[in-house]
DNA sequence: GACATGACATAAC
DNA sequence: CGTTATGCCATGT
């Protein structure tokens, strides 16, 4: 079955709920947030949701693009804000990128069966 | 309704 | 590393 159609009014709360449970010091990609929210393939919608957010409590800074980079113009104040907040949480930038291997949020760490 | 734009992703070259 | 192309979906003109 194809993904159920969801209006943005319904989608935003789902997206925010996922973003809210990204732990401190961890990051998630837009695509991952969309996926966890039950909206596969809607990464762009996540970006819009965060841009529209305005909720001061929302840890929007823990969402970066698939390359581990901040998805904002480097010249923007929001860029600096996001980077500063991440660094404050202990995230170390490798140049302008963060390592998903070290800081990527894994909802439920898959137990390795050997 | 066509067209452009964007806090995106993926693949190909 | 880079650029281009394609898919994607909501908004604004």
Image (cartoon, coloured by chain):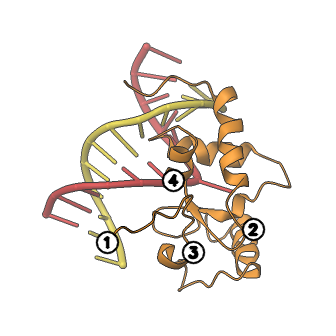
Chain colours: A orange, B red, C yellow
Is there one chain holding both mark 3 and mark 4?
yes
* Element type at mark 2: helix
**Which residue occupies 78% across, 54% down?**
A58
| The quadrant where residue C12 appears | top right
Relative depth, front residue between A110 and A49 = A110
* Element type at mark 3: helix
Q: Nearer the viewer, mark 1 or mark 3?
A: 1
Q: What chain letter is assigned to the residue under label 3? A: A
Quarter that holds the C terminus of chain A: bottom left
Quarter that holds the N terminus of chain A: top left
Where does label 2 land, which residue? Answer: A77
| Mark number displayed over residue A114 | 1
Q: What chain letter is assigned to the residue under label 2? A: A
Distance between mark 3 and mark 4 Cα atoms: 14 Å
First in sequence: mark 3 or mark 4? 4
Relative depth, front residue between A107 and A101 = A107
* Element type at mark 1: loop
Estimate the x, y position of residue A13 in percent, counting from the top left.
Answer: 71, 37
**Which residue occupies 67% across, 28% down?**
A10
Where does label 4 land, which residue? Answer: A32
First in sequence: mark 1 or mark 2? 2
In the image, is residue C3 above or below residue A37?
below
């Amino acid at each position: 079955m194809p993904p159920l159609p969801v209006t943005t009014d319904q989608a935003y709360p789902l997206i925010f709920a996922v973003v809210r449970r990204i732990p401190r010091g961890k990051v998630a990609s837009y695509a991952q947030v969309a996926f966890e929210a039950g909206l596969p393939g809607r990464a762009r919608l996540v970006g819009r949701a965060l841009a529209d957010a305005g909720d001061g409590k929302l840890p929007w800074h823990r969402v970066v693009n698939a390359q581990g980079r901040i998805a904002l113009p480097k010249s923007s104040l929001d860029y600096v804000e996001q980077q500063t907040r991440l660094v404050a949480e202990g995230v170390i930038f490798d140049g302008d990128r963060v390592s998903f291997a070290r800081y990527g949020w894994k909802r439920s760490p898959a137990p390795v069966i050997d």
